[in-house]
Image: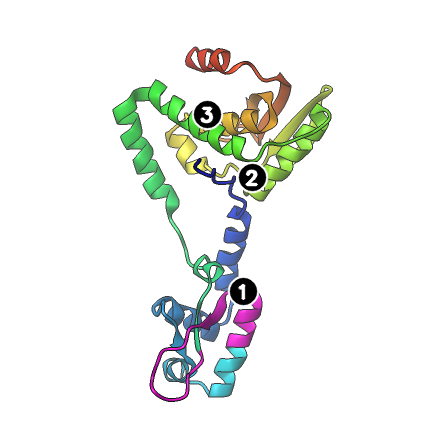
Amino acid sequence: MRSRRPWPDNSRRRRTEMSRLRQLGGTQQALLCHLLRHPDGTDVESLCARLRISHNAVRQHLTALIAHGWVERAPSLPTGGRPQARFRLTGSGHELFPRNYALIASELLDAVAEKLGEDGTREMLTRLGEKLGGAEPLHGACDAEIAQALAHRLDRAGYEAIATTRGGQAQVEAFNCVFHGLARRHRHVCSFDIAFMETATGRRIEHTECIVRGGNVCRFAIAGERQPMHEHALGAKNE
């Protein structure tokens, strides 16, 4: 059986790391850029020549970057002599550099919508949300606990979410729409969020406020037990 990929929880970390790159000094930025261009790693001598600083200074910078988890030791290359220490970027180090996933995601959704139409696109996004939501089910003794667990999960994914109560109803408020650019062009993207939340919580979710549609937050209300799958699908088609 194919394992399911868990709901990602590194969006906030990625944003933080990208801002940290801009906060680093010029020498450390240049060092990281040099390692980016040498994925198999490079030695201290090469870094000294590239950065025009001493061996001791290079090692001090490397020690600091290793402590942050952005650089690691790389396997030594056979030279016939004494092995030389080599260094390379870690996965977190690579994430310091800008990514543009939204562009290709938007183009992919355009292609899917053109091929499948509105209903087909909504169904595809719903299934994807259900798949990810089912990978890590949330548990709680009541709606308030479910909302708290859901807010924590969404917050890990970068939504800046909190659990709250309105009119006696447990809700989640998300202050950051992680798909904002996509959702402005493709309103069906919200189907992914709802399907994920409903599958993860086993509850019906009402999307009562939306940032893309002019709201101050994305508000998700916990609205009782989830419908059986076939009823849920019919309801989505009739929206």
User: Residue 132 location in percent, x, y?
Assistant: 49, 34
Label placed on residue 191: 3
Q: Which residues are magenta?
A: 62-85
| Residue 152 position by quadrant | top right
The residue carrying pointer 1 sits among few (fewer than 14), some (14 to 19) or many (20 or more) residues within 10 Å by Cα, namely: some
Q: Which residue position is annotated with label 2? A: 159
| Residue 108 position by quadrant | top left
> Please, what is the three-letter code of the amino acid marked with disc 2?
Tyr
The residue carrying pointer 2 sits among few (fewer than 14), some (14 to 19) or many (20 or more) residues within 10 Å by Cα, namely: many
User: Residue 73 location in percent, x, y?
Assistant: 47, 72
Residue 228 shows in this picture: yes
Q: CA distance from mark 3 to mark 2?
A: 16 Å
Look at the image and tell me in which quarter the N terminus lies: top left
Instruction: Check if residue 87 falls in the magenta segment.
Output: no
Nearer the observer: mark 1 or 2; the answer is 1
Above or below residue 94? Residue 200 is above
Above or below residue 38? Residue 170 is above
Does dot 1 land on a helix, a strand or a loop? loop
Nearer the observer: mark 3 or 1; the answer is 1
Residue closer to the observer: 217 or 156: 156
| Residue 203 position by quadrant | top right
Residue 239 shows in this picture: no
Label placed on residue 69: 1
Instruction: Check if residue 77 falls in the magenta segment.
Output: yes
Residue in the image at 40% along x and 52% along y: 99
- Between discs 3 and 2, the one toward the N terminus: 2
**Is 142 situated left or right of 63 in this image?**
right
Does dot 3 land on a helix, a strand or a loop? helix
Residue in the image at 41% along x and 28% along y: 125
Residue closer to the observer: 83 or 174: 83
The residue positioned farthest toward the front in the image shown: 1
